[in-house]
Amino acid sequence: MVRAADRAERPARTSVWLESRAPRGGGARGGQPSSLDRDRITEVTVRLLDAEGLAKFSMRRLAAELNVTAMSVYWYVDTKDDLLELALDAVYGELELPDLGPDSGPGPGPGPGPGPGSGTGSGPGSGEDWRDQLRAIASGYRALLVRHPWASPLAGTFLNIGPRSVAFSRTVQRVIRRTGLPTHRLTGAISAVFQFVYGFGTIEGHFTLRSADAGMSPDEYFQQALSTLREAPELGEVLEESKEIMRARGGSTVEEMYERDFNFALDLVIAGIEAMVLRGER
């Protein structure tokens, strides 16, 4: 049993980014391979996670891929969780974030110009509307979750205070501020947008991964799933009720269907933010 005194002496680890023990770059240390550093280890970790998934990842497997001993990796990180946290932050670096400049407050207020929250100025050199910026960030985040299915289960596991994660969070906050919503409503708006994107991207990523594991394209897997459902008599009524919706949905491929659904759902969320601003939500 862990005593309170033990916890005080050995407080729980919070984040690899708050640890100063391991080197974050540079060359060899204490006889370690000159080609090995934290950046290299993180790069290979991401590659392994993409190829083999989270369940199969281990320090031993990583060391084999790096052609070093497992102990060599521990010169640079303390635990497997440290590596996963580094990998998660690394993929956040793939997001293309808008350059908001030094200041990105709300757009012009009431008067001859655009109304509250229409915000067409987001800092020097940027004339993008907040809606377009939000769509771009949301689409990029969705693509990241599909490209790296292992990232979604890790997203709520760590503090996410690495430099790339912080840049993402800060940009989202600054764009949402430009909507014109009062400050105490901003976190709700962020949750509405990005919890939706998280859920959509996670499900899409799992479907894509499941298709690949079955040796099929997403379209082939989708058609096989429909065929299986048609063979189940107890699901006949549900399928019949869904026919009209599926026909109206449009899109001849799984990718097109996902794209249409995502864009419309995101438009609904943005319209909700606009409606709240117009009614003077306080």
Image (cartoon, rainbow, N blue to C red):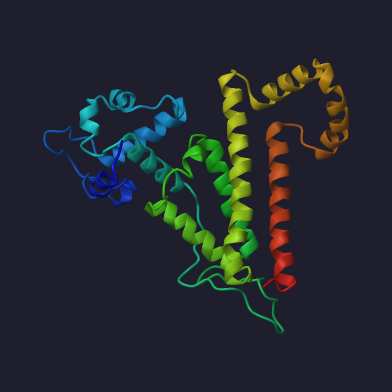
Left or right: where 220 falls relative to 18: right
In this picture, residue 7 sits left or right of residue 163? left
Quarter of the image for residue 267 reads: bottom right
Q: In what quadrant of the picture does the N terminus appear?
A: top left
Residue 269 at x, y percent in the picture: 69, 55
Q: Is residue 189 left or right of residue 222?
A: left
Q: Residue furthest bottom?
A: 111
Residue 127 seen in render: no
Q: Residue at x 52, y 34 (%)?
A: 149
Quarter of the image for residue 251 reads top right
Residue 91 vertical placement versus 60 (above, below): below
Disc count in the image? 0
Q: Position of residue 102 (x, y in %)?
A: 45, 71
* Residue at 84% in and 32% down: 242
Quick one: quadrant of the C terminus?
A: bottom right
Mark yes or no: residue 183 visible. Answer: yes
Location of residue 113 in the rendering, given as x and y in whole percent from the top left corner: 69, 80
Residue 2 lies in quadrant:
top left
Residue at 84% in and 27% down: 239
Name the residue at 14% across, 39% down: 29
- Residue at the top extreme of this rendering: 231
Residue 270, image x, y percentages: 69, 59
Comparing 10 with 123, the one in front is 10
